[in-house]
Amino acid sequence: MADQIRAVEPPADERSQLQGELDRGNEEVLRLRDLLISKDAELGSLKGPVAQLEAGTARLLNLVTRVRSLFPGFVWSTLAGLLRRLGPRG
């Protein structure tokens, strides 16, 4: 059995080449892991401002809905017609 195990082992020069490839692969894994960690931290730092913008947008949409509900539809259509007649200012 020990003879079979020795027969499977690669020659010394091939073994050092394989070890070098393995080391380079491990270095690449570590580099990519560090990159992933930094991108995850960057994403985490952006989630707070995005949540604030979403909350502000929701408040504005609620305000617009409330204002629109205070006046009947004909008021809004009349106002839109007046604004069209005034045309762009310039």
Image (tube, grey):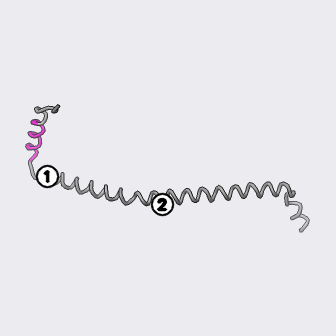
- Does the magenta portion include 77? yes
At horizontal 54% and vertical 57% (from top left) the residue drawn is 36
Please report the bounds of the magenta region as a residue range.
72-82
Percent position (x, y) of residue 9? Answer: 85, 60
Instruction: Name the foreground residue: 54 vs 70.
Output: 54
Give the residue at mark 2.
41
57 and 7: which one is in front?
Answer: 57
Q: Is residue 59 left or right of residue 76?
A: right
Q: Is residue 17 left or right of residue 28?
A: right
Mark 1 neighbour density, 10 Å: few (under 14) some (14–19) many (20 or more): few
Q: In the picture, which quadrant includes the N terminus? A: bottom right
Q: Residue at the right extreme? A: 3
Going from N to C along the chain, the mark reached first, 2 or 1, is: 2
Q: Is residue 6 magenta?
A: no
Secondary structure character of the magenta stretch overall:
helix
Can you say whether 52 is above or below 87 in the image? below
Kindly state the secondary structure of the residue where label 1 is placed. helix
Seen as rendered, the residue at the extreme bottom is 2
Q: CA distance from mark 2 to mark 1?
A: 40 Å
